[in-house]
Image (spheres, grey):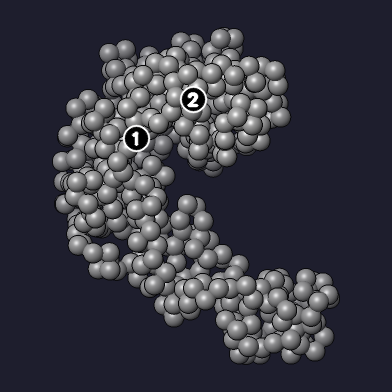
């Protein structure tokens, strides 16, 4: 029996799948005969972690909660040193006379990343299962590369890997399929199926051919990786091959009112999709539009700022730094947490009789530079077993030479950073490992959510060109953006209406 489970945004798809796992366990199914595979490692680990807590079992007892790439790697008994790395691609580029600065497969989702357009096309052709020149011919009007060079590099990369005894992530999937080493499962779960490539679909169909029951879960409306080779059309076409199609009908994220209404207007523009409806929360959401970035007030609450490309976020970064708002960008915090904690504890330490723990003092010392006598900067003269030291003790016995305010005492901080941090402290920004404001591309935020979401509707030239080929792509992309909001949605007017998605 094969079942499709459609999970619109915030409808609890993972919870539903784990409830099904529990039903099978209660019925006597061995956990090692249940396969649970996801497109991303994050989703696979989340399912594994929740299964550990829910069923009170150790992760070693759950061998088949993982990504498809991880299953292939494990089944083929491949050693890590045989997997292509950054350095291998750079070496390959040097041998072929082609500059390659970055090239790697993401451990999160198995997707290939590179600054080299030739390698990206080679990879996309492979995951789609088509010759590399066919991929080039399909998109030659958007690519500034030579056809002959592309073919040459494709052949040379195969030769390079064979000579070195190396494999990449796609090789793993291909070998898994060819060697027919598919485990036998009583029950198979495939999550995030809308993001699978044709190559991954071949592997999935190998898996479900041996499974007694299969559940294929996803949401075609959130399929935003076609540019990387994802094949949502196969997911949609499955409706003719399965026994049931079930839709989760209640969102626990999307509020009622204008946010839900806007999301529905967007997604109904998609030509090829499962026709589905879901109910929003009873609470009403808010929709606010702005003509200028300076009108946006992010001084309170949790925010997710989304754009189609990173460089559209520059104006938001500047606003955050001017206002003293703590943010993350490209998974990095705007200021290191250790530095902010050092500043806060230093000011408390020098202005009071507070006895600080040794770990905090060592952190402070690391930013004081020449204000700590050479030989004392690591704090090794302090006893870890002591509860801590007063600042006077450190000036007398442990090399401390200053009690100035932090922006005078701390070395290596440029004036812009100092100004930004002073604004943060003046605003009483909460110092946490995860800042309350996250700046991200829409692709990078898929699966995320926040109380407040700000969308920048500008799009790149290449996205517009790609939209001519796949007109549904931008609709799905901005549908994903809109449906990240739990309470309030904020939309900034585009800088250029000719290159914008009109929300």
User: Which element type, helix, strand or loop, lies under badge 1?
Assistant: loop
Is residue 413 visible from the viewing direction of this image?
A: yes
Is residue 176 visible from the viewing direction of this image?
A: no
The residue nearer to you, when weighing 458 against 231, is 458
Residue 106 located left or right of residue 369: left
- Is there CB contact under 8 Å for labels 2 and 1? no
- Does residue 167 lie above or below 298 as drawn? above
Residue 324 located left or right of residue 346: left
Residue 7 located left or right of residue 267: right
The answer to which of marks 2 and 1 sits earlier in the sequence is 2
Q: What is the quadrant of the N terminus in the image?
A: top left
Residue 182 located left or right of residue 447: right
- Does residue 155 lie above or below 405 as drawn? above
Question: Residue 220 occupies which quadrant of the picture?
Answer: top left
Label 2: how many residues lie within 10 Å, few (<14), some (14-19) or many (20+)? Answer: many
Q: Which mark is residue 76?
A: none
- Does residue 295 lie above or below 75 as drawn? below
Residue shown at 38%/30% (left/top)?
A: 143
- Residue 386 point in image, percent of width and height: 79, 77
Q: Distance between the residues labelled 2 and 1?
A: 18 Å
User: Which element type, helix, strand or loop, lies under badge 2?
Assistant: helix
Q: Residue 123 carries which label?
A: 2
- Residue 289 point in image, percent of width and height: 19, 59
Residue at the disc numbered 1:
224
- Residue 459 point in image, percent of width and height: 28, 45
> Exactly how many numbered labels are in the figure?
2
Residue shown at 16%/52% (left/top)?
A: 258
Residue shown at 58%/77% (left/top)?
A: 343
- Residue 41 point in image, percent of width and height: 52, 36
Of badges 2 and 1, nearer the viewer stands 2
Residue shown at 43%/16% (left/top)?
A: 133
């Amino acid at each position: 029996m094969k079942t499709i489970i459609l999970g619109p945004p915030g409808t609890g798809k993972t919870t539903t799948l784990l409830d099904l796992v529990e039903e099978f366990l209660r019925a006597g199914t061995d956990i090692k005969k249940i396969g649970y595979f996801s497109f991303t490692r994050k989703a696979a680990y989340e399912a594994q972690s929740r299964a550990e807590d829910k069923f009170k079992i150790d992760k070693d007892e759950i061998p088949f909660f993982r990504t498809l790439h991880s299953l292939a790697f494990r089944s083929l008994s491949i050693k890590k040193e045989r997997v292509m790395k950054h350095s291998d691609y750079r070496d390959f580029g040097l041998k072929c006379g082609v500059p390659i600065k970055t090239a790697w497969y993401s451990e999160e989702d198995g997707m290939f990343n590179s600054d080299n357009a030739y390698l990206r096309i080679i990879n996309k052709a492979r995951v789609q299962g088509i010759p590399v020149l066919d991929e080039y011919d399909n998109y030659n009007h958007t690519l500034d590369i030579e056809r002959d060079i592309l073919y040459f590099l494709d052949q040379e990369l195969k030769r390079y890997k064979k000579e070195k005894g190396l494999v990449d992530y796609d090789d793993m999937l291909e070998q898994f399929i060819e060697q027919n080493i598919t485990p036998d499962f009583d029950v198979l779960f495939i999550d995030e199926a809308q993001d699978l490539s044709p190559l991954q679909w071949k592997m999935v169909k190998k898996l479900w051919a041996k499974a007694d029951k299969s559940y294929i879960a996803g949401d075609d409306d959130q399929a935003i990786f076609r540019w990387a080779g994802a094949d949502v059309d196969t997911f949609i076409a499955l409706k003719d091959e399965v026994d049931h199609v079930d839709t989760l009908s209640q969102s626990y994220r999307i509020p009622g009112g204008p946010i839900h209404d806007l999301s529905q207007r967007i997604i109904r523009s998609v030509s090829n999709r499962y026709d589905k409806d879901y109910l929003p929360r009873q609470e009403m959401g808010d929709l606010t539009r702005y003509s200028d970035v300076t009108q946006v007030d992010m001084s309170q609450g949790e925010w997710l700022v989304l754009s189609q490309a990173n460089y559209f976020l520059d104006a938001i970064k500047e606003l955050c730094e001017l206002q003293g708002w703590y943010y993350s960008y490209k998974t990095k915090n705007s200021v290191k947490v250790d530095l902010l904690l050092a500043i806060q504890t230093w000011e408390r330490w020098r202005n009071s009789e507070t006895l600080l723990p040794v770990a905090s003092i060592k952190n402070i010392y690391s930013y004081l530079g020449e204000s700590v006598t050479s030989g004392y900067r690591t704090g090794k003269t302090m006893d870890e077993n002591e509860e801590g030291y007063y600042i006077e003790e450190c000036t007398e016995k442990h090399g401390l030479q200053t009690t100035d305010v932090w922006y005078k005492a701390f070395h290596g901080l440029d004036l812009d950073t100092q100004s930004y941090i002073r604004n943060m402290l003046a605003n009483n920004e909460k110092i946490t490992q995860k800042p309350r404001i996250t700046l991200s591309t829409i692709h990078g935020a898929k699966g995320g959510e926040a109380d407040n979401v700000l969308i920048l509707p500008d799009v790149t030239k290449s996205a517009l060109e790609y939209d001519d080929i796949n007109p549904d792509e931008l609709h799905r992309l901005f549908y994903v953006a809109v449906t990240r909001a739990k309470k309030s949605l904020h939309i900034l007017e585009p800088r250029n209406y000719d290159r914008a998605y009109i929300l």
